[in-house]
């Protein structure tokens, strides 16, 4: 849609940061991930992304409330449980899925904090998805 129309945008914060909504979304996402047997990619992504955010805050001397606030974003929860864990677009092997999740987390971090662009999660997933056949072949 973004390529075909000028009036389309994606707002990563549109899902809010309420803890109740995040809990409900994570619970529903947990059911989906469990059914799809792709919990490893979700957990690996969240661990890598959280590690990068906490590491950045420690390096900058920020309080840890800042990365915790960023991790409470509903769009991040939605992405983690429903988008990155799609069994058709993730590598077949467990090691490949963990590598894929780490690459997506690193790409999202790079887009957001080095390039200062929004929608780093979506851009990173789109670019890293191109590497899935290579990851499947190597691992």
Image: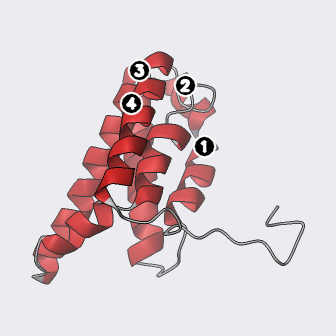
Circle 3 — which element?
helix
- Labels 4 and 1: the sequence-earlier one: 4
Residue 19 % position (x, y) = 29, 56
Q: Is residue 58 placed above or below 93 in the rendered structure?
A: below
What is the CA distance from the residue labelled 1 to the residue labelled 3?
Answer: 21 Å
Crowding around mark 3 (Cα neighbors within 10 Å: few <14, some 14 to 19, many 20+) is: few
- Labels 4 and 2: the sequence-earlier one: 4
- As drawn, the label of residue 136 is 2
Q: Nearer the viewer, residue 35 or 121?
A: 35
Say which residue appears at 38% left-offset and 37% top-offset.
42
Residue 106 % position (x, y) = 38, 57
- Labels 2 and 3: the sequence-earlier one: 3
Q: Is residue 29 placed above or below 34 in the rendered structure?
A: below
Residue occupied by mark 4: 30
Q: Is residue 92 placed above or below 100 in the rendered structure?
A: above
Quadrant in the picture for the N terminus:
bottom right
- As drawn, the label of residue 34 is 3
Residue occupied by mark 1: 129
Q: Nearer the viewer, mark 2 or mark 3?
A: 3
Whether label 4 touches label 1, CB < 8 Å = no
Crowding around mark 1 (Cα neighbors within 10 Å: few <14, some 14 to 19, many 20+) is: some
């Amino acid at each position: 849609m973004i390529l075909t129309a000028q009036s389309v945008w994606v707002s990563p914060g549109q899902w809010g940061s309420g803890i109740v909504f995040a809990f409900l979304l994570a619970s529903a996402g947990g059911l989906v991930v469990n059914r799809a047997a792709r919990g490893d990619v979700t957990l690996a992504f969240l661990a890598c992304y959280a590690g990068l955010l906490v590491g950045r805050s420690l390096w900058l001397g920020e309080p840890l409330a800042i990365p915790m606030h960023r991790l409470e974003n509903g769009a991040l929860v939605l992405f983690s449980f429903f988008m990155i864990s799609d069994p058709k677009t993730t590598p077949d092997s467990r090691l490949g899925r963990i590598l894929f999740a780490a690459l997506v987390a690193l790409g999202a971090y790079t887009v957001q904090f080095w390039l200062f662009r929004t929608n780093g999660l979506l851009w990173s997933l789109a670019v890293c998805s191109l590497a899935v056949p290579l990851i499947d072949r190597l691992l």
